[in-house]
Amino acid sequence: MKNAIEVQGLRKEFKSYSSRSGLKGAFRDLFSRNYKVLHAVNDISFSVKQGEMVGYIGENGAGKSTTIKMLTGILTPSAGEVMVNGMNPHKEREAFVQTIGVVFGQRSQLWWDIAVQESFRLLKKVYKVSDEEYDRHMGHVIQTLDIGPLLDKPVRKLSLGQRMRCELAAALIHNPPLLFLDEPTIGLDVLVKLKIRDFLKEINEKYNTTILLTTHDLTDIEALCDRVVMLDEGNIIYDGALQSLKETWGEGKEVQFQFMENVEITDLEKLTRDLPVKWELEEKEQRFIAYTTDEADAVSNLIGTVISSFQIKDVKIMEVSTEEIIRKIYEKGEV
Amino acid sequence: MDKYIEMIRIRFLMMLAYRTNYYTGILIYSINIGAYYFLWKAIYGGKETIEGLSVLQMTTYVAVAWMARAFYFNNIDREMAMEIKEGKVAVELIRPYNYLTMKTMQGLGEGIFRLLFFSVPGMLIVSLIFPIRFSADIYTWALFFVSIILSFFINTQINLLTGMTTFFLFNNTGLIRAKRVIIDLFSGLLLPLSFFPEGIQEVLKFLPFQGISYVPSMIFTSGFSSSETVQAIFLQGIWVLILIVPIQALWILAKKMLVIQGG
C-alpha cells in the first residue's frame, strides 16, 4: 500500500534574534541585530503507512510542532522532500488540505462567538461536503463524541473538554484519510481522554484513517500507537515499536518497601550488599525503593533478605513505567 | 464560491452576537455626522458657496461620506495582525481556501451589515434632524453604488497590505493607526479634496486614497460632471487592479517567511 507520509531529509531553520543588553545595546539593535540560525528540524526522514497510528514524541522544543506544520503545508521547509497523501503540502496547499484533518490542542479552529453548529456549517461548505454525506458521517461522530447538546452553544461558553470534542469533530467533517493531532488531550480529564481515545481507535478501524499524534501524555501513546517516532533537538533518535523500546530500556524491577519501625538506608545497604540492588529513600512517604535486575531470583532473594531482618508494612513490585523509560532517554539524549 | 458566501453569513452572525456594539454603533454614526454638520455650518457662516459647494451640498457630502464609510470601513488589518501575532494564522492555512479572499469576504459581510443596520437607520435619524438633500435620480444612485463597491475593494486591499506587514514586522500597531489617519484625511472623508492646496491635490491625484471616499461622495452630491464621474469610476477600477500586484507579491513572500508564533 502507498505511504501516507513520506519525508526525506527534511530540515527547517529559523533565524533567532537576540537583543543586546542595556540602553546602548537597544540603540545598536535598531541598526543591526545579532542572530543565530537555529535548526528546529534537522535532516529527518521517515514514512508512515496508510492506516498506521504513530506517536510523535519529544521534549518541549524538540521540533515536533515544526514538523507537523511542515507536513500540513503551513511552513515551508528549508530543505528536504515532503510527500503527504501523494502531494507536496506547501506547493498544492489548497488541494492538499482537503485531504487532511488537523487538531491543534492549543488553538481553537472554531469561531469563538458563534454557535458550534454554525462553525460546522461553514466548514461543511468549505470542504464541499454533501448533505447526505454530512448527515451520515457527522451524525455518527456527533453521537459518539456526545456533543449533540453542545451544538447550539457559542464556543466561548464551552468547557475545555467540551470544546476539544467539538474541535475533533470539526477536523473530521470531510472524513480525511489522514489526521494530525497536536497535543489533543492537553489539559483534559481522564473521562474525556478515554472518550477521545476510543473514538480515534474507532475511526482508525472503520475508515483506515492514518493518525499522527504528538503528546506529552504517554498513556495516550500506549493506548493508541504501536509505533513511536522520538525526536530530540531536531533529530529522530528512535523510530520503531513502543514494545521494543520498553524491552531494551525497561530492564530491571523496582521494589518498594514500607517498614513498621524506623530503618536507616545504610542498614539496608549493608544487609543486601551481596545482591545486585541499589537503594533509594523517598523522604516524603518514608518509602524505600530498591532497584534490582531482571534475573529470575533477584526479586525473591531481595524480599527474602529484607523480610528476615525487618518488619514490613507494605511491599510493592513494579515494572519500570514507560514514563520512566522516556525520562531516561530524554536525559541521555539518545537511544 | 459557496464557502465565501457562507463566510459573509457567519460574519453577520458574529456582528449580531454583540448587541450593545450594534446599538452604540448607530449612536456613534449619528453623533459623528451631527458634529460635522455643525462644524461646517459654522465654517460657512453667511457664505453661499465655498470651492463650488453649497452648504446643503456640503452637509449632504458629510452625511454620505460617513454612510459610505460604514460600508467600506473594516478592521481586517487589525484582525490579521492579531491572527498573525497569536499564531492563529496556522489554522487559516490548513483550510482549503485562500486566506486573503476569505478576509475580504469577512470585510464584505461586515460592510453589508453596517450599511443595512447602521447607516440606513443612522441616516433616517440624521435626515429628520438636519436638512440633507438626497438625489431622486436613480442613475446617480446606481453610479454611487458602483463607486462604493470599488471604494470597498480599494480600502480592503490597503488593509490587506497593512495587515500582511505583520508577517515581517511582528508588531505594527503604529502602522495600522497611521494608515487609518492617512485614509481619513486623504480620502476626503474629513474634508473634500477640492479644499486642499493645489500642490497637494496634484499629488493626491496619483494616490489611491481619493477613490475611497471622495469619489462616491462627490458622485452622490452631484459635485462631478457626468464625464468626470465616468473618469473617476474608471480610475477606481484601475486602482483595484494595480493593488492586486503588491498584495500577491507580499503574500508569496510572507508564506516563505512565515513563522508561527507561540508554538
Image: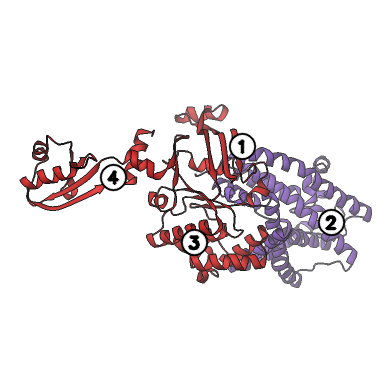
Label 1 sits on residue: B257
Establish whether labels 2 and 4 are both on one chain.
no
Closer to the camera: disc 1 or disc 3?
3
Nearer to the camera, A294 or B85: A294
Discs 2 and 1 lie in a common subunit? yes
Mark 2, other Cα within 10 Å: few <14 / some 14–19 / many ≥20: many
Tag 3 residue: A165
Please report, as a chain letter, where disc 2 is located. B
**Earlier-in-chain disc, 3 versus 4:** 3
Q: The red chain is which one?
A: A
Amino acid marked by disc 1 = Met
Residue B60 horizontal/vertical position (percent): 80, 62
Q: For chain B, what colour was chosen? A: purple
User: What amino acid is labelled 2 in the image?
Assistant: Met
Q: Position of residue A247 (x, y in %)?
A: 34, 41
Please say which color scheme the image uses: by chain
What residue is disc 2 on? B218
What is the three-letter code of the residue carrying label 4? Val
Query: Disc 4 is attached to a residue of which chain?
Result: A
Of the residues under marks 2 and 1, which one precedes in the sequence? 2
The answer to whether residue A169 is left or right of residue A261 is: right
Q: Name the residue under label 4.
A: A320
